[in-house]
Amino acid sequence: MFRKEFATIISKTGMIPLKDLRPLLLEDAPNIVGEFSLLSFSFFDDIKFAKQLSEEYKLPYIELRKAKIPKNILEGISKTNVIKYRSIAVQRTVKAVSIAIYDPSILNLQKELQTLIQAPVEFILTDITSWKRLFEKLQISIDEILQTIKVLSNDNDKDEKTIKEEDIGEDVIAYVNRIFADSYLKKASDVHFEPYEKKFRVRYRIDGSLVEIDPPPKLMMLPVLSRLKIMAQLDIAERRKPQDGRIKMLINGQSIDYRVSSLPTIFGEKIVMRILDSSNLQLDMTALGFEEKQLVHFKEAIYRPYGMCLVTGPTGSGKTTTLYSAISELNKIDTNISTAEDPVEYNMEGINQVNVRKDIGLTFAAALKSFLRQDPDVILVGEIRDLEAGEIAIEAALTGHLVLSTLHTNDAPSTVTRLLNMGIEPFLVTGALNVVVAQRLCRKICQHCRVEENISVEELVTCGFARATAEKIKVYKGTGCEHCGGTGYKGRVAIYEVMPITPAIRDLIIRGASADEIKKQAIKDGMKTLRMAALTKVAKGETTIYEATINSASDKL
């Protein structure tokens, strides 16, 4: 439950009135709101909150976001106890050990911590983000993670105990749990279990690329797949049809959802688990990868009282994160927001989220029709897939609602022609559309093994750099190290193409202009294409020429 003192502190900072926080203080509030969950609220200012706590409890406040703390100091408290006491050692002197906390209730545990550390303890207060980043620096072992794993039951699903787990075997259960722990530590987004004639392959998708791990014995294939199907509440006897399920796990104190999909292949069932870890969801727009001018255009579009904002790109390009950051920005106490998703990937406090289910007729179009009877201010539609959904979305945008959605197109200009090809009239498109955003994800160069890359000026010019720029910039690559698993990349960054619908572009749409003509006009109006945005990241040393070129098309028209 949300703590009353937190509500009082938040209201004192002026972020939001206390009366607007009252729904979270009710005993029967639908969601538990913990300290980390506060970061998902658009009104919440982490540093303001910490400074106010500092004043209330007379504790020194230190921002530790960029602090470089020696590893031996950080490990002064074991990882298990860091989780238990929510305390991290950040400094040791002859007098005392300084402990960073974000929750003053830990002050009551001072004696326990002093006994644990066997030294006097001094507390310093830091913001939740700083504490979380310090925590992530602690290299937790797989064995430690395994101790924290727990399967969370789904109340509305069939009882897992109807299937005897002893039939699976302890070694198989231990192996599957190790996969959960290992993929969590390596920050994988997907896990693939793939049967072949002579082997059973397991791969993780890390930073957008599949990486093979040490394969289990082929004899473990059926038991492992059966264990996963049991956990996902799938029919283990059905091996001829695709099935979809869900696993909810508690790992290292974090609730993580896994979307499970099975597919019958000629050598057995392939299972893919999509990992949905809400702690990795980036809701801060300024940290997504937008350039300053692009962010201004995007915010202007989503803050209009009505109209349509479209985000486009292939599967796995970060569209969901961009849309979630937008609705998080708009999520205010006086705004009614409804979403139709297939499926809902992350639960967001204060948002009415609906899972699309085609099997019972709950399509995107059906959800949209229902939303319009629910007094909405903002509507998010997971994807505009057909004319019916497109027409209803356009109608909603033209009748005083802000509509956010996605399309699968290659760039921003071709999104307009895609809507027209669906059968939507040009005058409706021009009247409804505020902005189109195209995006991709580029892998970031690992900062631990980054070196300068020797690329000729001619190659850089061919990629799209102006000759004058190509002659003076330095480009980099990663050589591969233990920090990045030998890939040379660590993490990803988004590149964006933001196309506001200007009067000139509206005229072109009415005249039935091609995507190339719209693109030329958009560039003339100041739009940076995906290739331009990617090359900017290269020039800043964030990504490689290779990543820039495979994730964006040439601008030659």
Image (spheres, rainbow, N blue to C red):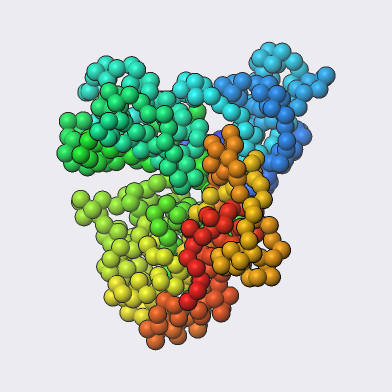
Residue 339 visible in the snapshot: no
Residue at horizontal 21 percent and vertical 30 percent from the top: 236
**Foreground pick, 222 / 130:** 222
Q: Report the side of 413 relative to 141 (left or right).
A: left
Q: Quadrant of residue 220?
A: top left
**As drawn, 503 above or below 384:** below
Q: Report the side of 249 relative to 444 (left or right).
A: left
Q: Percent position (x, y) of residue 367?
A: 30, 58
Q: Quadrant of residue 174?
A: top left
Residue at horizontal 50 percent and vertical 83 percent from the top: 504
**Foreground pick, 262 / 25:** 262
Residue at horizontal 50 percent and vertical 54 percent from the top: 441
Q: Percent position (x, y) of residue 372?
A: 33, 64
Q: Percent position (x, y) of residue 195?
A: 28, 34
Residue at horizontal 51 percent and vertical 40 percent from the top: 279
**Foreground pick, 400 / 548:** 548
